[in-house]
Image (tube, helix red, strand yellow):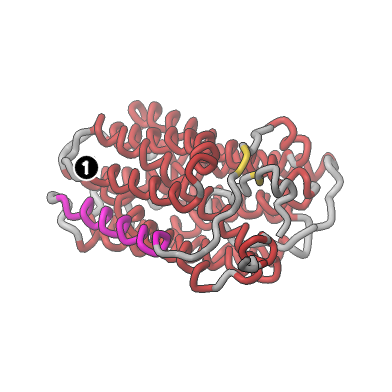
Amino acid sequence: MLEKNPATTDPGRAAQSAPLIAIASVIVSMALIAIGNGLMFAYIPVRLGADGFDPTWAGLIVTGLSAGGLAGCILTGPLVKRVGHARAFMVLSALIALSNAAIGAGPIPLLWIAARALYGFAIVGLFIVAQSWLNDALPNSIRGRVMAVFYVAYIAGLGVGYATLALVDIHTAAASLIGITFTALSILPVGMTRLAQPPAPQAASVALRRAWRISPVGVAGMLAVGGLSMIVSGFAPIHATAKGYSQADVALLLSAMPVGTLILQIPLGWVSDRTDRRYVLAGAAALAVVASTLAIVFDGGALMALVVIYLIWDGAAESIYALSSAHAADRAGKDELLALSSSMLFAWSLAGFIVPGIVTALSAVFGTATFIYVGIVIASAFCLFVLWRVIAGRPTPAPASGSFAPMSAQTPLPVELAFAPDDPTGSK
């Protein structure tokens, strides 16, 4: 009888022996998807504006995307349980390709709303699949570093995609074809990977009330950044197009925004590891308020001034995401982390659905600059709430149980899907 290879039968041994090339396949796949996704984010509002559509349609498309993301939070677990991580990844990638194909049919607003809802469902599902797969495969000694590379690779891919808009003829189907091409390429590394798949998951529960008891500031941060991230990334190109900025200008503005995420998160995270994270959260929210106020002052002005302002605004907002995640994890026990991460992701998605819908409705009355004012309200309210929690002394600051890791609101929180009964602890 052949002797079984322990590395293939014991999840802990498998994780430690997973080759880096196999782990890299998932990261490369997500980076390739990001290029196409960034291009489509930039292309849709510019194309609608060029064809004379009311900006309200672009806002409705952002709301549809968020609604799809909310569905992805709920339905990805059952999908992975049914077909496994690799097949789920390929199915969700195929849905993104179909979404891009529908966009290529031409500016048909109702079709585009449905297509972006499909994209929202698929991209949130992809992140849940990819991150839970990596978390299972990685040993503790390198998990933080690899996940940081994962986030940076995706954000860099988005930036490349945004910049690609300047090279595309928006009156053709070129943008959609490029998006489909990169999505198809993304399937290849995962389709050929030898990275072991985790056991079939059980459903991860969503318990917002329990998450609030663990970390009110963390949950409030997710609600705040869910709205902020979607309106900044979704409505900035809509407003810039309505203001008359060129296709190349919009591409430059959007491609600069991810740089703010990479620049601001590291120093803010370093500070948060050495003090009460709530101080840093309040500071990041205040910085977002200042940047959004400047966005009003310089609205329609010199492009480079706006690039710097939006870079800071987006970086500050994205930092709230990572800081809130770290703050909540500091206060949770090991047995609470799964439900907490699922609840935080749900809170982020819920706000990401509701706030763009409100902005879309208000924009029809007050114009495309409405998202800036809504952003000021959200960031100010969160800043005041954090300061109130600090002053009131509820809860008493807890010592950090872990270190800060860079994250982005464009890359949903990792949800470590619960393991099946044959490995109930999910131990590595």
Mark 1 Cα-neighbour bin, 10 Å: few <14, some 14–19, many ≥20 = many
Mark 1: amino acid: Gly
The mark tally for this picture is 1
- Quadrant where the C terminus sits is bottom right
Mark 1, residue position:
49
Quadrant housing residue 190:
bottom left
Residue at image point 45% right, 66% down: 25
**Which one is nearer the viewer's eye here, 214 or 415?**
415
Mark yes or no: residue 267 visible. no
Name the residue at the left extreme: 172
Residue at image point 83% right, 50% down: 397
Could you tell me residue 273's position as x and y percent? 74, 63
Say whether residue 396 is magenta. Answer: no
Name the residue at the front extreme: 1
Vertical comparison of 350 with 249: above or below: above
- Per the image, label 1 sits on a secondary structure element best described as helix
Left or right of 161 on screen, residue 405: right
Could you tell me residue 72's position as x and y percent? 48, 38
**Which one is nearer the viewer's eye here, 37 or 167?**
37
Residue at image point 49% right, 39% down: 79
**Which one is nearer the viewer's eye here, 22 or 356?**
22
Could you tell me residue 305's position as x and y percent? 39, 61
Say whether residue 182 is magenta. Answer: yes
Could you tell me residue 269's position as x and y percent? 66, 63
- Quadrant where the N terminus sits is bottom right
Secondary structure mainly formed by the magenta segment = helix
Tell me where the magenta segment starts and ends, as one range.
Answer: 173-191
Mark yes or no: residue 1 visible. yes
Residue at image point 19% right, 38% down: 107
